[in-house]
Image: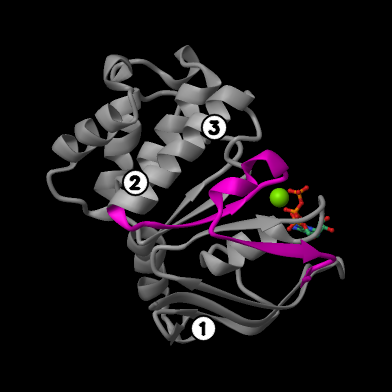
Amino acid sequence: MREILKTENLWKIYPDGTKALRGVDFVLRKGEFVGIMGPSGSGKSTLLHLAGGLDKPTEGEVYLLGRPLSTMNEDELAEFRKRRVAYIFQFYYLLEDFTVLENLLLIAELSGIENAEEKARRILDFLRLSHRLNHRPSQLSGGEQQRVAIGRALITEPAVVFADEPTGNIDWEEGRKIFDLFRRLNEEEGISFVVATHNPDLRSYFHRIVHLRDGKVV
Ligand SMILES: Nc1ncnc2c1ncn2[C@@H]1O[C@H](COP(=O)(O)OP(=O)(O)OP(=O)(O)O)[C@@H](O)[C@H]1O
Ligand SMILES: [Mg+2]
């Protein structure tokens, strides 16, 4: 299978001296659904940030389709972050002054997506949010807000979705529904997923699990 993303000897030492990652090698192939598990502080979020180009490693390299991110200029990196990868976080970071539909359209506009409104409506329909298009985020349940955040990630048609504790703030039933959605997107659209979670009950969704401990793969 084709390698989409690879990290090689990835180190992250934060300015205060914390060694969050200590030589992580990680490979993501097309169509994979990978879990990142490990105790709090083991480096899961740090790994997602570096692999997604949100932060830079202290040492080591991240490759996208064989290309080192360190050789990309700012424009290329911005393009990578806008169009190739998407992020879903534990806290949804939706824009409160905008409606559900507008939250997707704003990202679409920033990313230069064509036929944005049609796509946004289709995605929101898929996410069972058609009846909430003109609501504000604060008028939605936690699960609904997380589905909007997923919609915002999908509107850019990413090859890889990074999700950091995406069900950390919602109840078990809603959490399962979110994971069922991820699985459908993985199987039907071929989108690869890298999901950090504490929740051992979600293990069965993953094709493969990478266990981190003290910044290392174990
Ligand atoms: N900006 C930062 N500056 C200094 N240290 C940091 C920073 N961000 C994270 N760390 C430290 O790096 C280590 C790894 O943090 P990280 O957030 O990657 O862990 P995690 O596995 O995602 O934990 P959790 O399960 O609690 O989300 C921890 O010791 C954390 O305190
Ligand atoms: Mg984390």
Q: Is residue 185 visible?
A: yes
Magenta includes 172?
no
User: How many C-alpha atoms fall within 10 Å of the one at disc 2: few (<14), some, or many (≥20)?
Assistant: many
Q: Which residue is mark 3?
A: 176
Q: What element does badge 1 sit on? A: helix
Report the front residue among 201 and 139: 201
Report the front residue among 66 and 152: 66
Q: Residue 182's x, y, as percent?
A: 44, 44
In the rendered image, the vertical position of residue 94 relative to residue 216, given as above or below: above
In the rendered image, the vertical position of residue 159 relative to residue 217, given as above or below: above
The image quarter in which residue 103 lies = top left
Hey, what amino acid is under mark 2? Leu
Q: Is residue 156 visible?
A: no
Hey, what amino acid is under mark 3? Arg
Magenta includes 213?
yes
Q: CA distance from mark 1 to mark 2?
A: 26 Å
Quarter of the image with the C terminus is bottom right
Check mark 3 vs ligand 1: CB closer than 8 Å? yes or no: no
Q: Residue 137's x, y, as percent?
A: 45, 21
Quarter of the image with the N terminus is bottom left
The residue mark sitting in front, 1 or 2, is: 2
Residue at point 48%, 51% (across, down): 87
Q: Earlier in the sequence, mark 3 or mark 2?
A: 2
Q: Which residue is mark 2?
A: 154
Hey, what amino acid is under mark 1? Ser
Which residue, as the protein is rendered here, is positioned at the far front? 204
The image quarter in which residue 79 lies = bottom left
| Residue range highlighted in magenta | 189-218
Q: Earlier in the sequence, mark 3 or mark 1?
A: 1
Label ID, residue 70 = 1
